[in-house]
Amino acid sequence: MEEIQNLLHTEIQPKLASLRDKKRDYLEFQKLETELSQIQCFLTAYDYWACSNKVTNFEQESSELKNQIMEHEQLEKRLKDENVHIANMIETLAAKKQDNGGAFYKLEAEVKELSKEYAKINTQVDLKASSIKEESDALKAMEKIEKMMVPNVDALHATRAIQQERVNGLRKTLQKIEKDIQAHLFHYTNHARTIDPADVRGIVAELIQVPPEHLESVTAIETCAGGRLYNVIVSTDSVGAKLLDSNQTKLSKRTNLIPLNKITSANIDPSKIKSAKELAPGKVELALNLLQFEADLLNAMKFVFGNTLICKDSSSAKQVTFSQNVRMRSVTLDGDIYEPSGTLSGGSRNKSSNTLAKFQEYTKLRKELSAEEKALERLSEEICSAETVLGEYQKAEKKLELATHECALLEKQIESNANSQAIFQVENIQKEIDVETQRIEDSKSAVAELTERCKSLELEMRKFSTHKEETLGALKKEIQEEKKALVEETKKIQAEELKVQTLVQERIQLQQEMQTFETTETSLKATISGLMAEQEALKEKQSNMKVRIQHKFLLITLLNQDIIKSMEEKLSMERKTMLSHDTEMQAFEKTLKSNQKKIADQAGVLMRLRTEFENGSIECKKAASLLKEVTNNPENAWISDLKTQFGVDGGRFDFAKHNIVDLRKKVVQLTERHKATSRTLDRTVMEQFDRIEKKESSLVTKISTVMKDKNKIEETIDSLEKYKIDKLLKTWEKVSHDFGLIFGDLLPGNSAKLTPADGKNIGSGLEVQVCLGGVWKENLTELSGGQRSLVALSLILALLQFKPAPMYILDEVDSALDESHTQNIGQLLKNRFKGAQFILVSLKDGMYTNANVLFRTKFRDGVSTIERFAQNNSAIKGKGRT
């Protein structure tokens, strides 16, 4: 029963309560699933309806888009065909223009382009040169900075290494001291991040400082503070509560806290301190006066150090402590404590374990380490700044090298560029042309002089005809001289002819290589033609110097004028032709541009229509795919039955009444809640709840059944108890009566009975009482051994007579009795137990006489034998066991 109740209270009911909570969560989860399923069904119906409408609408719109695209494509094709025709016309006109002098403009444009490129390259070269100069100046400045910075950086690195060694040494020393005082340090972990580290001031030992002049009092101060020296000071009691809250903070050890806003202490009576100093001048001082600490910690320090005096020796401590004017607690420099109540504590102290002194050194080393680390950080910042400057120098140096390399490449490019070479060649040829032009001018002046000479010769010839004889000798002489001059002029003309031939070859080469010099070429042709004409005239003059030289000269002059005039007329006609070609080409180009603009517009419209069609096709495919996916999903079989209700106003699927975007957001939220809940949800909770609930009902039923059975058992026990008492009473009466009779038979004239113990009922037991000679014995110890044997045998036989058995075995029950008692036992058995059979083992004749059959055992020849004798046989005498 207790086991069932214990199981019910300790296991079943708590688990059932937990399962009820889980069942509630599971029902909420099922509700969430139902809501999510309904919204998803609604959104699925909306997607199906929207996709169906999209597919239907696109099928209607696609034919219109195709017709529009076809119309615009045909228009675009017409415009392109017209443009091709116009382009062919422009090409034809351009070919004609090129045939009529287009090469001139082409070469002129090429020369201009080459000149521009040459100027551009020169500009780039100048810019690069100036850039190189600037970079070079910057590099020189950076080199100066580098020369200044490199030694400084090395020195800073060396200083930083020394500083780092100093910091490492301080850290090692600090770690050693921290190891010694580790047990007293305070550490905490703020899990909830609800505590400002500034509100936790630290332990008292860290917040006080003993000045150098009072360092001898460190032991006394530590003794004065006692365990409070390691209490933690916090700004407010709320901060202390957060520190002690294990849910927010984890402390490294058990710690006492001193909140500054709550701590109070008794004020020190200045008269007592004055009296103490008068009693022991220069040997007594208040503990607080020997310490340095922040002003806002005063109340906490008063609480820790209290009204305690520091004395230099024990005598001064005794004086001030027990003085009626002082009566203050005092501590000696050795750490002995004197109380006004009369108690004294102290003795030997291990000065090497002075914790406060170690804390003083620990605090000092922390400050030094902080200062050294800040100095190390400043050095690192300086090194970083210097290295930054050096990095900038290296970048500038690389930049200068790159610019120099680019400049060299540019110069090589200029030298190797065919255009620049052509420009240089043109400049050289232009110079040669200028030189040859000057020479031609000189030749023209020489021809003019010769013409004058010819005129003078004609005059002289006239004179010669009149003064023939007088002047013949002089004329011959002059003719010889003129012949010599003519030979010289012939040589000059031949040299000029060679030069003219060279110029013609150079002109042909220039026509092949560069057609940009047509204007110069035309002038050179005219000049060369004149030179050739002059050459012919000189040849004519050489053959007939006197007669035809002026005539030829005049003919050459007239011929040159006709050529120039015809060339100018031809050039004017070509210009008019080119102008008409330009006018036609401009008209065609204007039409071409207009058509191209129209084509571009048509291309934009076509692109827009095709994009719209493609986007519509993609959207339609997506919608059809989604529609197919939704339709083929077995979970959406309900769509075929309810799709007629989609989008119907006032119906179950009235999409206008709902904001689809909000529903999708809600689905996302519900899905996240569903996922979050499903991760922790026990899906077997209903089964477990039913099973545990059934188990509880079963146990309650069992308890009820057990209680009913208990009541029945108790009733049965009560009835059995009554029945037992009744039976015991009857048995007692019967057994006690038979006990007395049997005892009277065995010991005639006497009696015995069974009685309850004093003050007890029969259920507690019975006592044997014996009456011998009319006197009831108080105790069986008053009987002899034989009498006690008869009492026992009488009780056994009375019990056997109450509930007889068919057979009894008694082994030497008469061994302690005399012959008469044995005889009485035999008669008793024979008379009172007639319905039972007794097997008795006895050695006395008094028992044999009452037996029906005797069995005797004895050894014969070393073998145990048994002999049987009937009752009618005479008594058997002799040794043996019967």
Image (cartoon, rainbow, N blue to C red):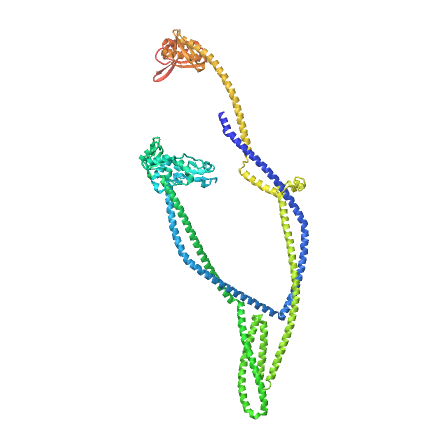
> Camera-side residue: 880 or 301?
301
Q: Give the quadrant of the C terminus.
A: top left
Percent from the top left, x then y, of residue 339? Answer: 35, 32
Work out whether 361 lies above or below 724: below
Q: Is residue 462 visible?
A: yes
Is 232 above or below relative to 703? below
* Among the 4 quarters of the image, the one containing residue 853: top left
Residue 524 coordinates in the image, percent (x, y): 58, 75
Residue drawn at the location 59% of the way across and 91% of the way down: 465
Query: In which quarter of the view is residue 606 placed?
Result: bottom right
Q: Residue at x 53, y 29 (%)?
A: 695
Which picture quadrant has residue 268? top left
The answer to whether residue 166 is left or right of residue 13 is left
Q: How many marks?
A: 0
Pick the front one: 831 or 861: 831
Q: Is residue 277 left or right of residue 600?
A: left
